[in-house]
Image (cartoon, helix red, strand yellow):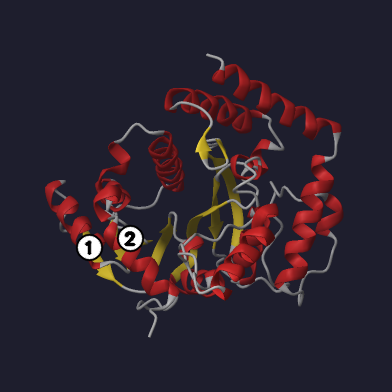
């Protein structure tokens, strides 16, 4: 019997545990983006001014880098992961960093958390949502174990990642051809390898799921641009990829409305209200990136396909504007300049 997708994902992370153990110390474009993700998350946690000894749950703790950093800030951390290898690495890092008493590695499932309701002042999940079978169930569980007034900080890969959209091999527009190729290969008895890939979501969909779980999104940012590829091959050298990423990140952090929608991944911070919202779904998000016309569309009861179609249509409509195309031309000019030296 073939293992479930979630079991295969766990095995994949087990096999790459040594890579995750070293990733935050590397200088590759991938490592820089992940390190920036962690830095932004930790800076947001610092701004929450949690009391010393606050209980924090990290879901998908990996090799324990973030859990150790949280413990060094005086918090008591439960580091949850599905992989026993990751749990062992977390324990080793906590002990060598002098915070072994403050970090408790646990093996568990984000879809069914083992903790009591309201057990934590902060729940953090970096890079987890895109690898889950049921992100909605996981967010419901995060909301359940967060105390009223506490916070949930999550990240997800962006379905509108510009580096992915610009590559003909990676763009979603190529999915029908890939599916046809896979079906033809299976029909001739030569099935293609079934690669495990993360799911990508728009920031709007994640915020909607947070609201439906009773959480109020209060902050959001995008992190990472690239590495840019052409037909799956690197378009730029590692150094030039880093320069392009940093330039686009600065623009997105300042005033790049379109860039804020098209980075590689994003972080969302949500708060659990002290009292249930009588309207349901929480208050509106002050930095909502959806067009005004979309905000008035009734969404309750819609199918996933309808939501996906609406998001894709709105994205295309937004990219037709002169300002948006000006930004796209700017990205291409930067890429060409970086490629030319």
- Circle 2 packing at 10 Å, graded few (<14), some (14-19), many (20+), is some
Residue 218, horizontal then vertical, whole percent: 60, 52
Query: Could you say which is closer to the camera, residue 185 or residue 268?
Result: 185
115 lies left or right of 234: left
Residue 128: quarter of image: bottom left
- Circle 1 packing at 10 Å, graded few (<14), some (14-19), many (20+), is many
Residue 57, horizontal then vertical, whole percent: 36, 63
- Can residue 183 be seen by looking at this rendering? yes
Residue 12, horizontal then vertical, whole percent: 34, 62
Query: Could you say which is closer to the camera, residue 289 or residue 191?
Result: 191
Q: Which residue is mark 1?
A: 85
Q: Are marks 2 and 1 in contact (CB under 8 Å)?
A: yes
Tell me what residue is drawn at x 27 percent, y 53 percent. Answer: 64
Tell me what residue is drawn at x 85 percent, y 60 percent. Answer: 296
Mark 2 and mark 1: Cα distance apart in space: 9 Å
Does residue 77 sit above or below 300 in this rendering?
A: above
Mark identifier at residue 13:
2
Tell me what residue is drawn at x 62 percent, y 59 percent. Answer: 178
Query: Could you say which is closer to the camera, residue 332 or residue 191?
Result: 191
142 lies left or right of 183: left
Residue 145, horizontal then vertical, whole percent: 43, 72
């Amino acid at each position: 019997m073939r293992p479930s997708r979630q079991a295969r994902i766990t095995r994949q992370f087990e096999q790459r545990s040594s890579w995750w153990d070293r990733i935050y110390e590397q200088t590759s474009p991938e490592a820089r983006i992940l390190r920036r993700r962690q830095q932004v998350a930790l800076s947001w946690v610092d701004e929450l001014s949690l009391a010393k000894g606050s209980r924090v749950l990290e879901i998908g703790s990996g090799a324990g880098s973030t859990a150790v950093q949280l413990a060094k800030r005086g918090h008591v951390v439960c580091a949850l992961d599905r992989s026993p290898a990751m749990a062992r690495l977390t324990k080793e890092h906590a002990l060598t960093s002098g915070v072994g008493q403050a970090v408790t590695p646990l093996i568990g499932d984000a879809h069914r958390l083992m903790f009591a309701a309201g057990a934590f002042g902060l729940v953090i999940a970096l890079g987890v949502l895109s690898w889950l079978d049921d992100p909605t169930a996981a967010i419901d569980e995060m909301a359940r174990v967060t105390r009223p007034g506490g916070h949930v900080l999550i990240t997800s890969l962006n379905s509108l990642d510009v580096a992915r959209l610009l590559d003909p091999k990676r763009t979603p527009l190529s999915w029908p051809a890939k599916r046809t190729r896979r079906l033809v290969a299976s029909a001739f008895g030569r099935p293609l390898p079934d690669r495990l890939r993360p799911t990508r979501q728009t920031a709007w969909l994640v915020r909607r799921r947070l609201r439906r779980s009773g959480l109020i999104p209060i902050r959001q940012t995008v992190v990472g641009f690239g590495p840019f590829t052409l037909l799956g091959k690197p378009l730029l050298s590692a150094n030039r990829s880093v320069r392009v990423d940093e330039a686009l990140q600065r623009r997105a952090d300042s005033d790049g409305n379109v860039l804020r929608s098209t980075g590689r991944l994003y972080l969302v911070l949500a708060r659990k209200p002290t009292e249930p919202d009588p309207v349901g779904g929480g208050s509106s998000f002050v930095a909502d990136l959806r067009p005004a016309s979309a905000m008035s569309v009734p969404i309750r009861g819609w199918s996933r396909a309808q939501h996906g179609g609406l998001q894709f249509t709105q994205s295309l409509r937004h990219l037709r504007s002169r300002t948006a195309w000006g930004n796209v031309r700017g990205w291409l000019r930067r890429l060409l300049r970086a490629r030319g030296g």
